[in-house]
Amino acid sequence: MESKAGSRKVVPVLEMLRYTQPMFSRRDFLVAGISASAAPLFASPRPAPARSCIFLVLTGGPSQIDTWDPKPDAPSTHRSPWKAIPTNVEGIQLTELFPNMARQADKFTLVRSVYHDGPAVHETGLQLIQTGYAFDGTEQPHVGACHSVLNPLGNTGSGCDVPNGQAGLLPVRPVASKNWERYGRTRFGLSCLHAANMVEAGAPFVTVNMFDTVFDANTWDSHGTSPFSSMKSYETHVAPAFDKAYAALLADLSERGLLDSTLVVASGEFGRTPRINPVGGRDHWPQCWTALLAGAGIPGGQVYGSSDATASEPKDQPVHASRIAATIAAKLGMHHAVEPLS
């Protein structure tokens, strides 16, 4: 049954589980190729779902063309001020803001054709990537809440999504100074380190919000004027923090033997305008952006989908933002009404 909050209908987590019961697919969730060769990303299906998920929510919406989908041949009105650099996977480039990621491109898959066709506001994209639905009067639970009810945290009785800041629910290892240094001495770096420790301790789902606001702070929301960020903040603050923490997280999970059983997803709620605006920033652009997937049997060094010459819209294999949540559900062994990547 649906409960009501004012004029809004809320779908309780337990009711939602009618649509998210565990399932084991005979084929894996993602079959695609980097090029026309159409080599499958997964040569054989996994026999069981991922045990845990770490979801890095890149609040503010990273610019696709300035991060993980560089277009060095785009017109100067669109082209990133940061050059494209090679990675340790032939044929895959990132911008020079991500040297640590470039050395570990063999550990993650780039989905360069994510989009949605709703309003270009933060809330719409955040709802889609985390629940698979846009708000239409009925509130849907976070995909992590569904998974955590099916996989509760031992005797804590939490049964809910475990965001940064609730590490006290689990017997996690203490944070050593040298480990924090590896992740970067930033709030986001510490959050990612906590996420790794929590997964090691048995947390089924950890959500890390990179920022708690886009106002008067250095974030991905690079409109170029106050109270939002300038593009320069990508170089000085935002990209270095993500680059170091993300690369450290994948390496650390791999060293602990956890990457094969942990799905790591990183996505913003939209991309940014391909054309640089009059004040040197980029505005909201839900028509195309890039998400990152790693772990849980996803082979690295892959690209799913592509964008056009200016990263304005998907060129092939378009991925609606709702399929991010659906893909997480599928990899965690749950059904979702929205089709996962396939």
Image: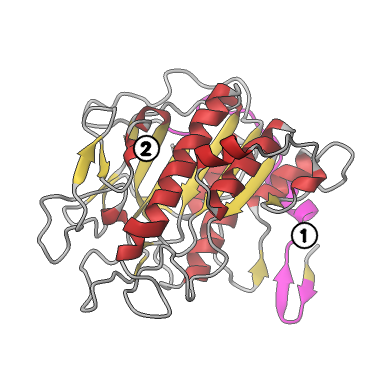
Q: Is residue 22 magenta?
A: yes
Q: Which residue is mark 1?
A: 12
198 is higher (above) or lower (below) than 73: above
Residue at image location 14% in from the left, 50% down from the top: 72
Residue at image location 59% in from the left, 32% down from the top: 262
Residue at image location 42% in from the left, 18% down from the top: 43
Query: Where is residue 308 shown, x and y percent of the image?
Result: 20, 52
Q: Quadrant of residue 41?
A: top left
Q: Earlier in the sequence, mark 2 or mark 1?
A: 1
201 is higher (above) or lower (below) than 194: above
Q: Quadrant of the N terminus?
A: bottom right
106 is higher (above) or lower (below) than 282: above
- Which is more toward the observer, 261 or 124? 261
Q: Number of labelled discs?
A: 2
Q: Which residue is mark 2?
A: 100
Q: Quadrant of the C terminus?
A: top left
Q: Which residues are magenta?
A: 4-30
Disc 2 packing (10 Å; few <14; some 14–19; many ≥20): some
For residue 16, say whether it is visible: yes
Query: Where is residue 123 shown, x and y percent of the image?
Result: 53, 69
In the rendered structure, which amino acid carries the disc numbered 1? Pro
Colour scheme of the picture: secondary structure
Query: Where is residue 147 shown, x and y percent of the image?
Result: 70, 43
* Marking on residue 276: none
2 and 1 marks in contact (CB < 8 Å): no
Question: Which mark is in front, 2 or 1?
Answer: 2
The alpha-carbon separation of the residues under discs 2 and 1 comes to 41 Å
- Which is more toward the observer, 236 or 147? 236
- What secondary structure is marked by label 1? loop
